[in-house]
Amino acid sequence: FVTQAKYNRVMLKISGEALMGDQGFGLHPPTVQRIAEEVKSVHDMGVEICMVIGGGNIFRGLQGSAQGMERTTADYMGMLATVMNALGMQSALEELGVFTRVISAIPMDQVCEPYIRRRAVRHLEKKRVCIFAAGTGNPYFTTDTAAALRASEMACEAIFMGKQVDGIYDSDPKTNPDAKRFDRITYNEVLTKNLKVMDASAIALTRDNNMPLIVFSLDEPGGFRGILAGEGTYTKVM
Ligand code: UDP
């Protein structure tokens, strides 16, 4: 019996912080392995998977520039951090037997592939997980925007945002016990209510390209697979 997935091709966006476990910095290999297992379980359903991983567990451009570093240089450092995370995830996935390509917006041929759209599509068709690294390749952007951009370019059916909470709430559920989760919400409501889901330019890009966004908890074991099979709690932005 094979659980039927409701999607054929998806984008999974996770923050860099999702990889650091309780360490407060960097990559925590057991945490990376756990997320790789979640990805494998969806890959086993026959779903074509794109991934974008942030870099905030290593370096954030804004923080660097707040401490006096030149902003664009700091942003390039942030983009390089995402390449490290992508390589860590690739290693964990391939350990599980899932063929994976790291595809960087900034060419670094000895380390990973450069981004060539048609080539990336071909990898997906061959059921290789594609991890898009180095964000959009441009400073002043975020990996949320990169996820929105690559999801559209790869014709993904939806972006799945793996968070530490099971959706979008009207206030922080970790501090407010009365916080209410939205089942569905529009892009414009996310923008006008200033809900912290993605940054505004990423939300606008998903809206303008009619790319549904599903916010779910990656902390729930089996959660990603469950959501793909149409189970569990989440918030759908559309
Ligand atoms: N970044 C960038 N352009 C991009 C994507 C990322 O300049 O297209 C830089 C930016 O400095 C950002 C850092 O990379 O702070 C890490 O990415 P992000 O903050 O999105 O990571 P996350 O918060 O998802 O871990």
Image (cartoon, rainbow, N blue to C red):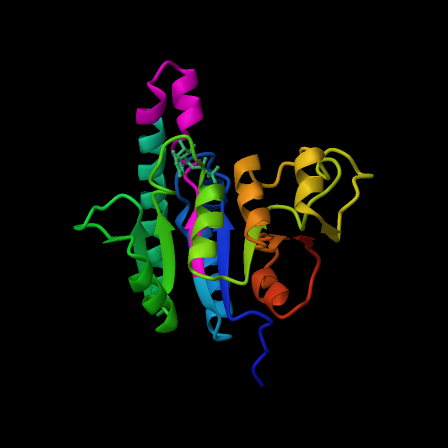
The residue shown at (35%, 70%) is 97
Where does the image place residue 83, in percent across and percent down from the top left?
A: 32, 45
**Region in magenta:** 50-73
Q: Which residue appears farthest toward the front when viewing the image?
A: 208
Q: Can residue 163 be seen in this view?
A: no
In the picture, the quarter occupied by the N terminus is bottom right
Where does the image place residue 211, in percent across and percent down from the top left?
A: 57, 55
Above or below, 32 against 7 in this view is above
The residue shown at (73%, 33%) is 175
The residue shown at (66%, 45%) is 187
Query: Going by the image, does 168 lie left or right of 132?
Result: right
Where does the image place residue 236, in percent across and percent down from the top left?
A: 67, 54
Above or below, 13 against 170 in this view is below
Q: Can residue 42 be seen in this view?
A: yes
Where does the image place residue 189, in percent across and percent down from the top left?
A: 71, 41
The residue shown at (39%, 38%) is 26
Quadrant assignment for ligand 1? top left
